[in-house]
Image: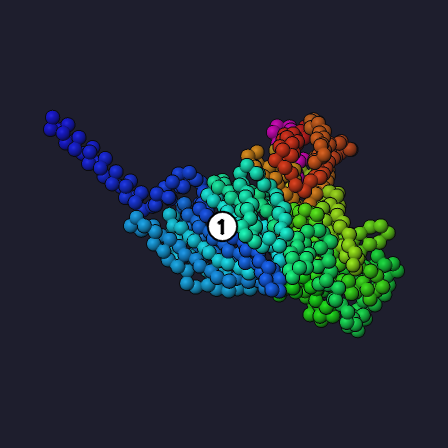
Amino acid sequence: MEHYTMLKIYKSGLFAFLLFIVTSLQAQYSPEFLKYSKLHPEEPRIRLLEETIITIEIGKEGLEIHQEFMQEDLYLNESATYNSKDRLSFSAFFELDQIEASSYSFENNTYVKSAVEKFTEKDELNTSFYDDTKTLNFVYPNLRKGSKSALKYSQKIKNPRFLMPFYFGDYYPVKQNKITIIADKEVDLEFRKFNISEDKIKFTKEEKRKKTIYTWLLTNQEAYKFESNSPSFKTVVPHIIPIIKSYKIKKETKNVLGEVSDLYNWYYSLVKGVNIEKPDPELVALVKEITADKKTDLEKVKAIYYWTQKNIKYIAFEYALGGFIPRESNDVFRKKYGDCKDNSSILYRMLEIAGVKGNLTWIGTRKIPYTYEEVPTPVVDNHMILSYENEGRTYYLDATGRYIKFGIPTPFIQGKEALVSYGKDFKVKKVPVIAAKENALIDITNIKIENGSVLGTSKTSISGYPKIDVFHDLENLKNQTKLKEFYNSMFEKGNNKFLVNNFKETNKYHYDDDFIVDYDFEIKNYAKSLGDEIYINLNLNKDLSYYKTDEKRENDIEYDYKQYFKNTTSLEIPTGYKVDYSPENIKVTNDLLTCEITYQLEGNKVIYNQTIELNFLVLSVTQQKEVNKLIDKIERNYKEIVVLKKE
């Protein structure tokens, strides 16, 4: 009886102790935290509130636009520390007005506020086309699991063409997202909507006195899943792009945007006064020198284009409208650097000196998914190039890159619309997507078997965009050891015992010709012997497997370019052996992918061929499944072996 009583007391005490521990742990966190950590156990944070208020008023000199932002985040795990650093961007077009930032730690059943006191301004050197972006950097103090952060700031928008998109959702859950635009009735506003579900986002419009109030409200939005190599989040996340079409001031209507012609007319007003001074005599002499032996306009353009790629360094840093106005070609020539507009400016002038007409061209990279008709505002593009027309073909000249072969665009503008200037007129054209066979990796290999190891020689030719990628990698490799390591990785065949012994490079850094690498190699213990038979897998290159995507993937997947592979492997049959078994040929194909593997016996050699043609830039989830099915068939064939038997 006494033992039972003591056991009961012990259990009661243990229960009370555990209850105390649980209660103590819960007391460390707010009820709000306990609620949302249970609802979102895998998420590092939740945005409790995101609110944007924009006021558009007609002042004495024009539109006055002011926007306020409020954000409140709750951190659900220990990664809160990594979110302590934050920053805001601003520029001559987006003037930062006021800012308040604080963190809140839950202590003794209440949130304790710690205000951010230090803000550090930095120049933001990036690929921005638009402006002189700077950042204001700061750190939230004492941020940890269970903490909250609050940010409030305001901006003045100096140009009515620069209303930015508003996004409903992010890669973390959002409890409430509200956007309010309060505009004078004399302001004609239009809203372009993308990925919007009307049943999830509540929209209201009301008029009060001389104001029109537009409101969008989204609640309880789950996190969007981040997956590598996905297209721009603009293709997935719901968002709205507001456009000010016009406004009335002093009984006069001022057009702003709304049509592509409005955007072009503004762009043209900024560039029509560029390059009006006489060209530098040294620039004139240079053009004559590099085109002296060129017989056609096309040859002249090509020579000038290559000189610009090689000699004008790309640096993107602008101030105010300098983000839209190219510098004078003479300045670019003297400094030997510039951004995309400056490269286009000097190209334009050099062609002009050579008696050839070029066209300034605005374009958006593939990160921007809109057409000019869909979004006729500066949001639609972020890049400038030069166009040149010859015998019905348009050449898109982007000198910001290096090693770009004349006749192909840079990879990040493939398939995009281009706004081409013809003085007061313009055309919208579409940049072609380069065919897979233009981006080729062709490998010819000869192998023989010695003591179970494979010894071989290869010649690999690389063209198109893959060649450019390789050249960029090679620029950072300064000695033979690093080069050999690079080629070991790039050309790996069979398995990880592959080792390049010697190599020779041809046409390195050449713009027009294919880059060729000749090399010899060894793969130790690759062929297997059993009794009087030798087993060897001739699928030395399993390139197709790289394009197989995770079956659980939820987003589209994007690639830089279409591509073509051709691998030919000739196996020298060892003396005294014959082919006892050779795998069947196989071919799989659809509109996206074609792959064929064949085996042939020619004299004392087994000739293996594999061709792969990848005809896609973006694969939807459905298309990924289609491609995966074909890859599964090929991967089964990748396991097939050739059997050699003693005669």
The part of the chain drawn in magenta is: 529-541
Q: Position of residue 229 (x, y in %)?
A: 60, 44
Q: Hey, which quadrant is residue 42 in on the image?
A: top left
Q: Position of residue 130 (x, y in %)?
A: 63, 59
Q: Quick check: 331 above or below 8? A: below
The C terminus: image quadrant: top right
Q: Classify residue 407 as left or right of residue 528.
A: right
Q: Residues within 10 Å of mark 1 (few under 14, many from 20)?
A: some
Which is more toward the observer, 357 or 206?
206
Q: Residue at x 42, y 38 (%)?
A: 39
Q: Classify residue 204 as left or right of residue 417.
A: left
User: Residue 532 in magenta?
Assistant: yes
Mark 1 — residue?
51
Q: Residue at x 72, y 46 (%)?
A: 415
The N terminus: image quadrant: top left
Which is more toward the observer, 336 or 154?
154
Three-letter residue code for mark 1 = Glu
Which is more toward the observer, 605 or 350?
350
Q: Quick check: 69 above or below 132? A: above
Q: Classify residue 216 as left or right of residue 130.
A: left
Q: Residue at x 41, y 45 (%)?
A: 76
Q: Residue at x 58, y 41 (%)?
A: 196
User: Residue 445 in magenta?
Assistant: no
Q: Quick check: 29 above or below 353? A: above
Secondary structure beneath disc 1?
Answer: strand
